[in-house]
Image: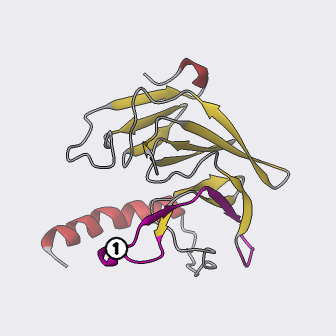
Amino acid sequence: MNFFGWILLMLLTPNMQAATNGMELAWRNLPDLPRALGGQFVGVINDRLVVAGGSYFHVPPWDGGKKQWVDTIYTLGRDDREWRLAGHLPSPVGYGVAISLDEGMLCVGGQTPAGNSRETLHLRLQGGQIVIDRWADLPQTASNMAGARTGDTVYIAGGQTAPESTSALHEFWALALANPREGWR
Protein backbone atom coordinates (compact mmCIF):
# COMPACT_ATOMS: atom_id res chain seq x y z
CA MET A 1 0.00 0.00 0.00
CA ASN A 2 1.36 3.43 -0.89
CA PHE A 3 1.55 6.49 1.35
CA PHE A 4 -1.83 7.86 0.25
CA GLY A 5 -3.50 4.49 0.87
CA TRP A 6 -2.27 4.54 4.47
CA ILE A 7 -3.49 8.09 4.95
CA LEU A 8 -6.93 7.15 3.59
CA LEU A 9 -7.08 4.09 5.85
CA MET A 10 -6.18 6.20 8.90
CA LEU A 11 -8.88 8.76 8.03
CA LEU A 12 -11.61 6.19 7.41
CA THR A 13 -11.05 3.88 10.38
CA PRO A 14 -12.35 6.29 13.07
CA ASN A 15 -15.35 7.16 10.88
CA MET A 16 -16.18 3.48 10.37
CA GLN A 17 -15.95 2.85 14.09
CA ALA A 18 -18.23 5.80 14.84
CA ALA A 19 -20.74 4.73 12.17
CA THR A 20 -21.15 1.26 13.67
CA ASN A 21 -21.72 2.62 17.21
CA GLY A 22 -19.72 -0.25 18.63
CA MET A 23 -21.71 -2.88 16.71
CA GLU A 24 -19.80 -5.79 15.29
CA LEU A 25 -19.91 -6.05 11.51
CA ALA A 26 -20.24 -9.49 9.96
CA TRP A 27 -19.51 -10.12 6.29
CA ARG A 28 -21.00 -12.97 4.30
CA ASN A 29 -21.26 -13.96 0.67
CA LEU A 30 -24.57 -13.31 -1.03
CA PRO A 31 -26.14 -15.74 -3.49
CA ASP A 32 -24.96 -15.31 -7.07
CA LEU A 33 -27.18 -13.27 -9.36
CA PRO A 34 -28.91 -15.37 -12.04
CA ARG A 35 -26.54 -13.69 -14.52
CA ALA A 36 -23.31 -11.75 -14.00
CA LEU A 37 -24.03 -8.11 -14.89
CA GLY A 38 -22.20 -4.84 -15.33
CA GLY A 39 -23.58 -1.32 -15.06
CA GLN A 40 -26.68 -2.35 -13.14
CA PHE A 41 -28.67 -0.08 -10.82
CA VAL A 42 -28.23 -1.25 -7.21
CA GLY A 43 -30.06 -0.02 -4.13
CA VAL A 44 -32.36 -0.95 -1.27
CA ILE A 45 -36.16 -0.88 -1.11
CA ASN A 46 -37.95 -1.88 2.12
CA ASP A 47 -34.89 -3.71 3.46
CA ARG A 48 -34.50 -5.69 0.21
CA LEU A 49 -31.43 -5.41 -2.00
CA VAL A 50 -32.45 -4.49 -5.57
CA VAL A 51 -30.50 -5.04 -8.81
CA ALA A 52 -32.11 -3.59 -11.95
CA GLY A 53 -31.02 -3.52 -15.57
CA GLY A 54 -27.40 -3.65 -16.70
CA SER A 55 -25.56 -5.50 -19.41
CA TYR A 56 -23.35 -8.51 -20.10
CA PHE A 57 -21.35 -10.16 -22.88
CA HIS A 58 -21.93 -13.77 -24.08
CA VAL A 59 -18.52 -13.51 -25.73
CA PRO A 60 -15.84 -11.04 -24.51
CA PRO A 61 -15.71 -7.81 -26.51
CA TRP A 62 -12.07 -8.41 -27.49
CA ASP A 63 -13.27 -11.62 -29.20
CA GLY A 64 -15.99 -9.78 -31.12
CA GLY A 65 -18.74 -10.11 -28.52
CA LYS A 66 -21.69 -7.72 -28.58
CA LYS A 67 -23.08 -6.14 -25.42
CA GLN A 68 -26.42 -7.60 -24.32
CA TRP A 69 -28.79 -5.33 -22.38
CA VAL A 70 -31.30 -6.44 -19.73
CA ASP A 71 -34.46 -4.99 -18.19
CA THR A 72 -34.79 -7.44 -15.29
CA ILE A 73 -35.25 -6.37 -11.67
CA TYR A 74 -34.13 -8.81 -8.98
CA THR A 75 -34.59 -8.49 -5.21
CA LEU A 76 -32.93 -10.26 -2.31
CA GLY A 77 -34.21 -10.18 1.28
CA ARG A 78 -31.94 -10.36 4.29
CA ASP A 79 -32.44 -14.12 4.82
CA ASP A 80 -33.14 -15.15 1.20
CA ARG A 81 -31.05 -17.90 -0.33
CA GLU A 82 -31.66 -16.83 -3.92
CA TRP A 83 -32.56 -13.74 -5.93
CA ARG A 84 -36.19 -13.28 -6.93
CA LEU A 85 -37.37 -11.79 -10.23
CA ALA A 86 -39.59 -8.90 -9.08
CA GLY A 87 -40.29 -7.10 -12.36
CA HIS A 88 -38.90 -5.47 -15.47
CA LEU A 89 -37.78 -1.96 -16.35
CA PRO A 90 -39.76 -0.35 -19.21
CA SER A 91 -36.73 -0.96 -21.46
CA PRO A 92 -33.19 -2.34 -21.08
CA VAL A 93 -30.86 0.22 -19.46
CA GLY A 94 -27.71 0.39 -17.35
CA TYR A 95 -24.82 2.65 -16.36
CA GLY A 96 -27.03 5.26 -14.67
CA VAL A 97 -27.37 6.21 -11.02
CA ALA A 98 -29.41 4.41 -8.36
CA ILE A 99 -30.50 6.39 -5.31
CA SER A 100 -32.21 4.62 -2.40
CA LEU A 101 -35.08 6.59 -0.86
CA ASP A 102 -37.25 6.00 2.19
CA GLU A 103 -40.10 4.81 -0.02
CA GLY A 104 -38.28 3.29 -2.99
CA MET A 105 -35.33 3.70 -5.31
CA LEU A 106 -34.59 6.06 -8.21
CA CYS A 107 -32.94 4.86 -11.42
CA VAL A 108 -31.66 7.98 -13.18
CA GLY A 109 -30.36 8.23 -16.75
CA GLY A 110 -28.06 5.57 -18.12
CA GLN A 111 -27.31 3.87 -21.43
CA THR A 112 -29.69 1.89 -23.61
CA PRO A 113 -29.00 -0.06 -26.81
CA ALA A 114 -30.04 3.10 -28.71
CA GLY A 115 -27.96 5.64 -26.72
CA ASN A 116 -28.15 7.53 -23.45
CA SER A 117 -31.34 8.14 -21.49
CA ARG A 118 -32.88 11.12 -19.67
CA GLU A 119 -35.42 9.05 -17.72
CA THR A 120 -35.92 9.09 -13.98
CA LEU A 121 -37.73 5.97 -12.79
CA HIS A 122 -39.07 5.57 -9.25
CA LEU A 123 -39.17 1.90 -8.23
CA ARG A 124 -41.19 0.74 -5.23
CA LEU A 125 -42.33 -2.63 -3.90
CA GLN A 126 -46.00 -3.50 -3.71
CA GLY A 127 -47.04 -7.04 -2.83
CA GLY A 128 -43.54 -8.33 -3.55
CA GLN A 129 -43.54 -6.90 -7.10
CA ILE A 130 -41.85 -3.76 -8.39
CA VAL A 131 -44.10 -0.88 -9.38
CA ILE A 132 -42.49 1.80 -11.54
CA ASP A 133 -43.49 5.46 -11.73
CA ARG A 134 -41.87 7.81 -14.21
CA TRP A 135 -40.62 11.03 -12.66
CA ALA A 136 -39.28 14.18 -14.37
CA ASP A 137 -36.61 13.57 -17.01
CA LEU A 138 -33.09 14.92 -16.63
CA PRO A 139 -32.46 18.15 -18.60
CA GLN A 140 -30.31 16.11 -21.03
CA THR A 141 -29.20 12.55 -21.64
CA ALA A 142 -26.54 11.29 -19.23
CA SER A 143 -24.81 8.09 -18.16
CA ASN A 144 -21.91 7.20 -15.86
CA MET A 145 -22.65 10.05 -13.50
CA ALA A 146 -22.45 10.25 -9.71
CA GLY A 147 -25.42 10.77 -7.43
CA ALA A 148 -26.41 11.07 -3.80
CA ARG A 149 -29.29 11.98 -1.57
CA THR A 150 -28.97 14.38 1.31
CA GLY A 151 -32.06 15.33 3.27
CA ASP A 152 -34.95 15.88 0.86
CA THR A 153 -32.81 16.48 -2.23
CA VAL A 154 -31.21 14.16 -4.78
CA TYR A 155 -28.09 15.42 -6.56
CA ILE A 156 -26.60 14.20 -9.85
CA ALA A 157 -23.16 15.30 -11.06
CA GLY A 158 -21.04 14.76 -14.15
CA GLY A 159 -21.42 11.86 -16.53
CA GLN A 160 -21.39 11.63 -20.31
CA THR A 161 -23.96 12.79 -22.87
CA ALA A 162 -23.45 9.75 -25.14
CA PRO A 163 -21.82 6.31 -24.76
CA GLU A 164 -19.03 7.33 -27.14
CA SER A 165 -18.33 10.65 -25.37
CA THR A 166 -14.67 11.36 -24.71
CA SER A 167 -15.29 14.21 -22.26
CA ALA A 168 -17.30 14.52 -19.07
CA LEU A 169 -20.36 16.65 -18.43
CA HIS A 170 -19.80 19.62 -16.14
CA GLU A 171 -23.40 19.61 -14.91
CA PHE A 172 -24.83 19.43 -11.40
CA TRP A 173 -28.57 18.80 -11.04
CA ALA A 174 -30.86 18.70 -8.01
CA LEU A 175 -34.31 17.19 -7.54
CA ALA A 176 -36.46 18.17 -4.54
CA LEU A 177 -38.10 15.02 -3.18
CA ALA A 178 -40.87 17.10 -1.59
CA ASN A 179 -42.13 17.89 -5.11
CA PRO A 180 -40.38 15.76 -7.76
CA ARG A 181 -42.91 16.87 -10.42
CA GLU A 182 -41.15 20.26 -10.48
CA GLY A 183 -38.26 18.49 -12.14
CA TRP A 184 -34.50 18.74 -12.07
CA ARG A 185 -32.89 22.13 -11.61
The image position of residue 71, as x and y in percent, is: 61, 55
How many numbered discs?
A: 1
Can residue 179 be seen in this snapshot?
no
Taking 25 as reference, is 162 above or below it? above
Residue 87 percent location from the top left of the image? 72, 55
Tell me: residue 2, above or below residue 153. Answer: below
Determine whether the residue tagged by mark 1 lies in a helix, strand or loop: loop
**Other-residue count near label 1 (Cα within 10 Å), few / some / many at <14 / 14–19 / ≥20:** few
Amino acid bearing label 1: Gly
Query: Looking at the rendering, which quadrant does residue 47 occupy?
Result: bottom right
User: In the figure, is residue 76 to the left or right of 144?
Assistant: right
Which residues lie in the magenta part? 57-82
Name the residue tied to disc 1: 64
Side of 134 where 174 appears, left or right: left
Q: How is the image coloured?
A: secondary structure
Rendered location of residue 86, percent (x, y): 74, 58
Which residue is rendered at x = 42% and y = 26% of the image? 139
In the rendered image, the quadrant that contains the C terminus is: top left
| Residue drawn at (21%, 72%) of the image | 6
69 falls in the magenta region: yes
* Quarter of the image where the N terminus is located: bottom left
Q: Does the magenta stretch include residue 164?
A: no
Q: Which residue is drawn at 75% across and 74% down?
A: 80
Q: Is residue 69 left or right of residue 31?
A: left
Left or right of 156? Residue 50 is right
Q: Can residue 144 be seen in this view?
A: yes
Q: Residue furthest right?
A: 127
Q: In which quarter of the image is residue 171?
A: top left
Residue 166, image x and y in percent?
20, 47
Q: In which quarter of the image is residue 177?
A: top right
